[in-house]
């Protein structure tokens, strides 16, 4: 609004200055120009100033307004990165947000599931009773249908939990396969997933086949 008023004021001043030059100064180059024609030229220039000033000032006015809104929202502990989000976030009554790695640890854990038609409500502290053949199929599927890896933590790292590389969901299943949850009653099925992947021989003659 202020930018528009400044543009209108500049247009009026320009119009009056041009009329004053014609009437009181009367330079030689305006001797052949009538007062009406000069006034018309002055009016056109004034309108041009208004038309140019208002659109050019709109982006600046919008940016200043959004920046002011951002500052006010910051006082309500609502920090936003993009100014365009002020209108949306300003109308919100409840904000539920999550960012992996900030509010969480960027880790996933299998807490419950169904294995061989057996429901388990606690996959962290409990174990499941199933046949060795079923456990072998589940463990083989977890190992071969995954590209994630679990690496030991460096000795100088404060967090000595294994490091996860790749998809976090697949890594959660791999970590489950390394616990006593599946096949805890028999040591025969507890084979590391790297060994199972090597035995699969994907892409090799006589090895397992991949289906899209």
Image (cartoon, rainbow, N blue to C red):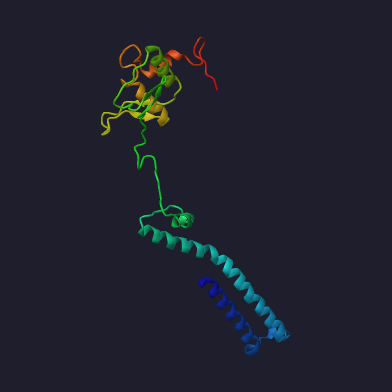
Nearer-the-camera pick, 155 or 63:
63
Nearer-the-camera pick, 167 or 118:
118
Q: Position of residue 206 (x, y in %)?
A: 51, 9
Farthest-out residue, bottom? 24
Question: Image check: 38 left or right of 142?
Answer: right
At a point 59% along the width and 80% down the height, the residue shown is: 12
Up the image or down, 158 lies above or below 82; here it is: above
Q: Position of residue 175 (x, y in %)?
A: 35, 25
At a point 40% along the width and 12% down the height, the residue shown is: 133
* Quarter in which the C terminus is drawn: top right
Up the image or down, 103 lies above or below 71; here it is: above
At a point 30% along the width and 24% down the height, the residue shown is: 126
Up the image or down, 41 lies above or below 57; here it is: below
Up the image or down, 147 lies above or below 78; here it is: above
Q: For residue 170, which quarter of the picture? A: top left
Q: Position of residue 132 (x, y in %)?
A: 37, 12
Question: Image check: 87 left or right of 161?
Answer: right
Question: Image check: 65 left or right of 14?
Answer: left
Q: For residue 119, which quarter of the picture? A: top left
Q: Position of residue 69 (x, y in %)?
A: 43, 61
Q: How many marks?
A: 0
Question: Image check: 156 left or right of 7?
Answer: left
């Amino acid at each position: 609004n202020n930018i528009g008023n400044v543009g209108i004021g500049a247009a009026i001043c320009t119009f009056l200055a041009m009329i004053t030059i014609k009437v009181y100064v009367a330079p030689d180059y305006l001797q052949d120009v009538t007062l009406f024609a000069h006034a018309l030229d002055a009016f056109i220039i004034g309108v041009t100033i208004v038309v140019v000033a208002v659109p050019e000032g709109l982006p600046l006015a919008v940016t200043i307004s959004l920046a002011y809104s951002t500052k006010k929202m910051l006082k309500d502990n609502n920090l936003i990165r993009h100014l365009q989000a002020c209108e949306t976030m300003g109308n919100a009554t409840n904000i539920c947000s999550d960012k992996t790695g900030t509010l969480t640890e960027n880790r996933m854990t299998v807490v419950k599931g169904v294995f061989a038609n057996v429901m388990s409500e606690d996959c962290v502290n409990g174990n499941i009773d199933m046949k060795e053949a079923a456990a072998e199929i589940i463990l083989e599927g977890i190992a071969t249908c995954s590209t994630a890896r679990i690496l030991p933590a460096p000795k100088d790292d404060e967090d000595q939990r294994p490091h996860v590389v790749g998809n976090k969901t697949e890594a959660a299943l791999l970590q489950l396969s390394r616990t006593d949850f599946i096949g805890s009653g028999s040591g025969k099925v507890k084979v590391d997933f790297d060994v199972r992947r090597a035995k699969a021989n994907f892409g090799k003659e006589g090895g397992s086949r991949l289906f899209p």
